[in-house]
Image: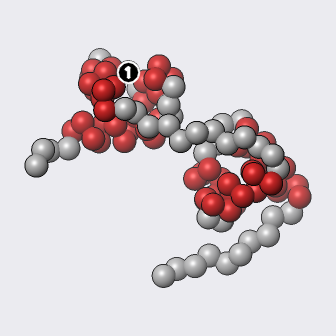
Amino acid sequence: MLRQPNRKLQPAEIAELVASYVAGASIRSLGKQYGMHEQTVRAHLRRQGVEQRPVLIIKDEDLALVLELHQAGWGARRIGARLGVGQSAVWGALKRTTRPGP
């Protein structure tokens, strides 16, 4: 198992991390940027009193709409904005709709 060394952020880095998250950066991208686990990023945000965005997924009943919009030429960002989710949720939904059945 690979372990990352424990990385201590300086106060200025924590302020940058918080500002990036508030501006829309994902926890995953911040973890990569700062070289730390996503749970550590969440802990920094929690300690700074930042309300974290909920993890949103696309419901099964919306999969047909996602596929329809994608086939009509809509991009993942636009579909996500319509449904109130991020691009990664849209891509995940598209993968679910295009998987071969059992």
Identity of the residue drawn at 50% across and 31% down: 85
Inspect the image, locate mark 1, and give the three-letter code of the amino acid beneath it.
Answer: Trp
Where is residue 39, by image quadrant? bottom right
Say whether residue 44 is left or right of residue 94. Answer: right
Q: Position of residue 88 (x, y in %)?
A: 45, 40
Q: Is residue 22 above or below residue 67?
A: below
Tell me the residue that label 1 is attached to. Answer: 74
Residue 11 in sight here: yes
Q: Is residue 70 above or below residue 2?
A: above
Say whether residue 59 is left or right of residue 39. Answer: left
Dot 1: element: loop
Residue 16 in sight here: no
Q: Is residue 75 above or below residue 40?
A: above
Identity of the residue drawn at 20% across and 44% down: 99
Q: Pick out the residue farthest to the bottom.
A: 1
Q: Position of residue 90 (x, y in %)?
A: 40, 34
Q: Position of residue 96 (x, y in %)?
A: 27, 41
Q: Residues within 10 Å of mark 1 (few under 14, many from 20)?
A: some
Q: Position of residue 62 (x, y in %)?
A: 33, 25
Identity of the residue drawn at 31% across and 21% down: 65
